Image (spheres, helix red, strand yellow):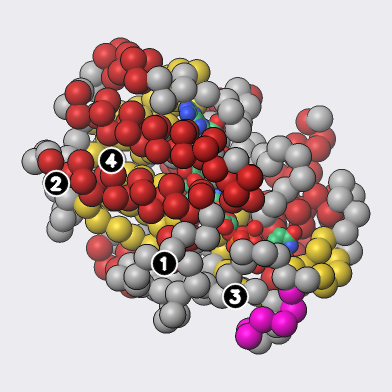
């Protein structure tokens, strides 16, 4: 319990940021959120308040605007930690609009590092991604695996942001940082009051599954069944967003308590287990009782075959381990889908 500690959450009204804000509030932290609502809705603040009975301080600002971000630190000199989520995240869009991604994700990172440095803020946790590994040569993939050439401009921004943090840490004595490499975050809060809100046609598997089951999409396309996997469909490490949110609490507490071994550390945040697309489909049908209309189509360009995390390093050093199952996550995603559609 870190009462009276204040954490700044950039992108805190987004999917992972909102679940993380809830976990910090539940642990007794004060939470300040900044978000430009570029990929989220203001109603998420109500969801966080309904779950926790606390309404976090909120600033609608664009973090690339340095003066505006600086003003937040000036308003809240008690902020001693930052969790940096704010970025664009659509892999496909980043291929078509690379400059949109370089502009927001890299300038946003620079702005956060500068504001922290100028305001004596020493602890940073950054949202990185397993995409930095590409298709790993060895599975499960450890944090020591080589960084492969990025498969998209989005993936490249994650690699560059990690390097930016490393460089700034080298130039400052008092900055402590952790990059969390998320695998595939899915699911929603158990209350079904917050969850993932993709705009338009979803790129990611789970929102496509829930929208198909709800009747918003006619059919799920399963991209490829000729991979070198047990049932031929691609394999990922799907992590419940609540478990992922808790990893951020563990990471911030490691920094606050000076338990870090280095001023830049990297942790995989996954379950350690791989599941195929067809396993996801079958588990969804089992836990919800809904029948999914799907068909096998060609592979999606740019997809890797299989990846799942080696979680030993995080378990040992963060004292964190995923606890919820794929079934839990899919059930919560379905409850959330029904909740938002009823709201519309
Ligand atoms: P999200 O889009 O739901 O949340 C990001 C939030 O940041 C949004 O609310 C958006 O409005 C805000 N934002 C974007 N640019 C901003 C800016 N310049 N100023 C202020 N706010 C800004 O995405 P998410 O799924 O919650 O992802 C959070 C982070 O985790 C991102 O950095 C993403 O790249 C990373 N990540 C996500 C996944 C995933 O599959 N969801 C996997 C690995 C890493
Ligand atoms: C999962 C599996 C698809 C949709 C992406 C980013 C990655 C990270 C997480 C941010 C794949 C298959 C999907 C569909 C399908 N994000 N699929 N039909 O591609 O593993 O990872 O999100 O850092 O960087 O690349 O996630 O949910 O899109 O796909 O068959 O309609 O589901 O081929 O095997 P992905 P995803």
Residue 235 at x, y = what percent? 61, 74
SS at circle 2: helix
SS at circle 1: loop
Q: Which residues are magenta?
A: 224-229
Dot 1, crowdedness within 10 Å: few (<14), some or many (≥20)? some
Q: Is mark 4 within 8 Å of ligand 1?
A: no
Residue drawn where x is 21% and y is 46% of the image: 167
Name above or below for residue 240 compared with residue 252.
Answer: below
* Marker disc for residue 307: none
Would you say 152 lies left or right of 171 here? right
SS at circle 4: strand
Front tag of 1 and 3 = 1
Name above or below for residue 104 compared with residue 73.
Answer: below
| Label 2 – label 4 distance at C-alpha | 14 Å
| Label 1 – label 3 distance at C-alpha | 15 Å
Give whichever of 201, 341 is nearer the camera.
201
Front tag of 2 and 1 = 1
SS at circle 3: loop
Residue 193 showing in the rendered view: yes
Q: Are marks 3 and 4 in contact (CB under 8 Å)?
A: no
| Label 4 – label 1 distance at C-alpha | 24 Å
Q: Which residue matches tag 3?
A: 305
| Label 3 – label 2 distance at C-alpha | 36 Å
Q: Which residue matches tag 1?
A: 148
4 or 1: tag closer to the N-terminus: 4
Q: Which residue matches tag 2?
A: 170
Is 226 a magenta residue? yes
Residue 256 at x, y = what percent? 20, 42
Q: Are marks 1 and 3 in contact (CB under 8 Å)?
A: no
Residue 34 at x, y = what percent? 44, 25
Give whichever of 115, 216 is nearer the camera.
115
């Amino acid at each position: 319990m870190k009462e009276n500690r204040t954490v700044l959450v950039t992108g805190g009204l987004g999917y992972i940021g909102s679940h993380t804000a809830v976990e910090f509030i539940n642990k007794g932290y004060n939470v300040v959120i900044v978000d430009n609502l570029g990929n989220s809705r203001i109603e998420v603040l109500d969801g966080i308040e309904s779950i926790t009975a606390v309404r976090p301080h909120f600033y609608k600002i664009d973090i690339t605007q340095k003066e505006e971000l600086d003003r937040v630190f000036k308003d809240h000199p008690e902020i001693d930690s930052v969790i940096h989520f704010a970025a664009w995240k659509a892999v496909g869009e980043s291929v078509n609009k690379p400059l949109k991604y370089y502009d927001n994700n890299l300038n946003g990172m620079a702005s956060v590092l500068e504001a922290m440095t100028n305001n004596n803020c020493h602890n940073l946790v950054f949202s990185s991604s397993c995409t930095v590994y590409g298709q790993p040569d060895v599975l499960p993939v450890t944090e020591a695996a080589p960084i492969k050439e990025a498969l998209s401009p989005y993936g490249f921004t994650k690699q560059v942001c990690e390097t930016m943090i490393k460089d700034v840490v080298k130039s400052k004595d008092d900055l402590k940082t952790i990059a969390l490499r998320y695998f595939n975050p899915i699911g929603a809060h158990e209350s079904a009051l917050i969850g993932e809100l993709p705009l338009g046609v979803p790129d990611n598997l789970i929102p496509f599954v829930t929208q198909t089951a709800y009747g918003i999409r006619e059919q799920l396309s399963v991209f490829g069944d000729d991979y070198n996997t047990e049932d031929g469909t691609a394999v990922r490490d799907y992590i419940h967003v609540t478990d992922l949110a808790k990893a951020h609490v563990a990471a911030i507490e490691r920094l606050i308590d000076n338990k870090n071994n280095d001023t830049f550390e990297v942790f995989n945040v996954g379950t350690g287990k791989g599941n195929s697309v067809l396993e996801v489909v079958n588990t969804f049908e089992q836990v919800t009782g809904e029948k999914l209309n799907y068909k096998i189509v060609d592979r999606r360009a740019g997809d890797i075959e299989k990846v799942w995390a080696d979680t030993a390093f995080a378990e040992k050093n963060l004292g964190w381990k995923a606890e919820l199952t794929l079934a839990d996550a899919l059930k919560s995603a379905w409850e959330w889908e029904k909740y938002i559609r009823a709201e519309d």
